[in-house]
Amino acid sequence: MMAASRDADSAPRVAVVGGGIAGLTAASRLARQGCAVTVYETGRGPGGRTSTRRAGPDGQGWQFDHGAQFFSAKDPHFKTIVDEWVAEGIVGEWQGTFGVLDGNSKTFTEDTETKTRYVGTPSMNSVAKSLAKRTGVELVTSRRVVRFEKGADESDSWSVVHRSSAPPPVDADGNLTPEPPKADPHFTAIVVADKQTASDRSIRVYNEDPPIKSAEAPVIWNGMRAASQTPSFALMFAVKRMNDKVSLFPFHGATVTNDKTLSWIAEDSSKPGRPLNENKSSGTVQCFVAQSTADFAKARVKAMSTIPGTSPHQTLLDEVAREMLEAVLRLAGMDKKSVEVVHVAAHRWGAAFPGDEAFASARESGGGCLSDFEKRIVGCGDFCVSPKIEGAALSGAAAAARVTEMIKGTPSASL
Ligand SMILES: Cc1cc2nc3c(=O)[nH]c(=O)nc-3n(C[C@H](O)[C@H](O)[C@H](O)COP(=O)(O)OP(=O)(O)OC[C@H]3O[C@@H](n4cnc5c(N)ncnc54)[C@H](O)[C@@H]3O)c2cc1C
């Protein structure tokens, strides 16, 4: 073990940017190795694309996994990790009826292949939440990292500069007035766990350079920018159950084919551990999540270079939600009058699924991550291995191993 015997003050400090599965896998492993890890997450909680949204009269009972729907474990190393999550009770198996819904004929064909579908319990973000609570991991939420600074002191350590991710206040002339950023110093190494940190969206939305540019680490910059991305919209909706036997659809999850708008529909409340599943007496409502096709998302996502949380952003999202709900009802063969929709919202995933352009460079650079050994900075995320939870976890594990090597190769006086 690297530094398990070090006391908290002398433990090497590592900053992780991004509280998704990759960042938190890296963080929890580094903490287990004796590092003091700070994870910066721009969202209000951990999870990234494994997030869960809550709604309903008490704000809790209706749940929607609006990113990843379920995951499988093909890699033996990842299967070992998943077995631990199952033993901890933060992951369970989603059992039900799954298959393909043909958008033309509206017929459903059930899968014959047996496949294990894992989900976080009681919500998809349970894994991220649990990893964020491990000893040695500090999670800082609602902060957007804007740049990195190196060499501010003689130890050649990194500082992480970040600011609030809440929409900035507007002055009397209508100009946005963001608060000044804060800098946290003395990090021995940095893990940047999202290729969005190299995206020009920073310039379009915030008029700021992408944060990773300031690190001047070309392997990471080029690798992140090489990976293409496909957007997606998620629709979250809840309906009043028609009666005890009838559901909107004859399945719990279906890939939709031959439809311009939708690619997936699932009854989220059929997953294990969900309040509406556990407590049947409150099961008068069913929660669903639908995903758009890539073409539907591409045609709409560019118009949304707006700050999340602001009213122009919300107006565009409401329009997307209306279009997607119409498509759902069409596929269900229902009209608005025959279904009581009690909640509806949409979420924009500008970078839902990465292309595989960065896999080779990640393999070469750090066996599943991108790394600059001299600068002690590593890039990781699903875009380095495969566009799934499995790929994100394996990349986070690779990043932790790489940082461990970097710290071992750093003179102890600078740690
Ligand atoms: C709609 C959808 C459906 C999916 N379905 C499945 C599925 O069924 N099965 C499956 O296995 N996978 C699925 N995926 C993919 C899966 O969710 C991802 O592969 C995985 O969650 C990626 O994890 P990550 O840690 O690499 O990235 P992310 O989860 O994206 O985490 C990166 C984090 O970094 C944060 N961040 C970025 N920039 C900054 C900054 N400057 N400062 C602070 N924080 C920052 C982001 O807010 C984010 O939380 C789906 C994804 C989407 C969007």
Image: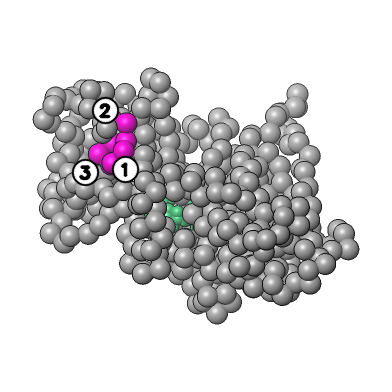
Q: Of circles 2 and 1, which is in front? A: 2
Q: Position of residue 321 (x, y in %)?
A: 38, 35
Seen from this angle, which residue lies furthest front?
Answer: 5
Q: Amino acid at mark 1?
A: Ala
Residue named by callout 2: 279
CB atoms of marks 1 and 3 within 8 Å? no
| Residue at 65% in and 53% down | 37
Q: Position of residue 94 (x, y in %)?
A: 26, 48
The reply to whether the residue tagged 3 has its Cβ within 8 angstroms of ligand 1 is no
Residue 273 falls within the magenta-colored stretch:
yes
Disc 2 crowd rating (10 Å Cα; few below 14, some 14-19, many 20+) is: few
Inter-mark Cα distance, 1 to 3: 12 Å
Marks 2 and 1, the one that precedes in the sequence: 2
Q: Is residue 195 above or below residue 364?
A: above
Disc 3 crowd rating (10 Å Cα; few below 14, some 14-19, many 20+) is: many
Q: Is residue 276 above or below residue 208?
A: above
Give the quarter of the image for residue 294. Answer: bottom left
Q: How is the image coloured?
A: one colour
Local SS, label 2: loop
Local SS, label 3: loop
Work out whether residue 186 or residue 145 is closer to the camera in this orientation and state it. 186
Q: Amino acid at mark 3?
A: His
* Left or right, residue 201 beside residue 10: left
Q: Of circles 1 and 3, which is in front? A: 3
| Residue at 38% in and 20% down | 57
State which region is magenta: 268-276
Residue named by callout 1: 290
- Quadrant where the C terminus lies? bottom right
Residue 252's disc number: 3
Specify whether residue 180 is in view: yes
The reply to whether the residue tagged 2 has its Cβ within 8 angstroms of ligand 1 is no
| Residue at 53% in and 36% down | 313
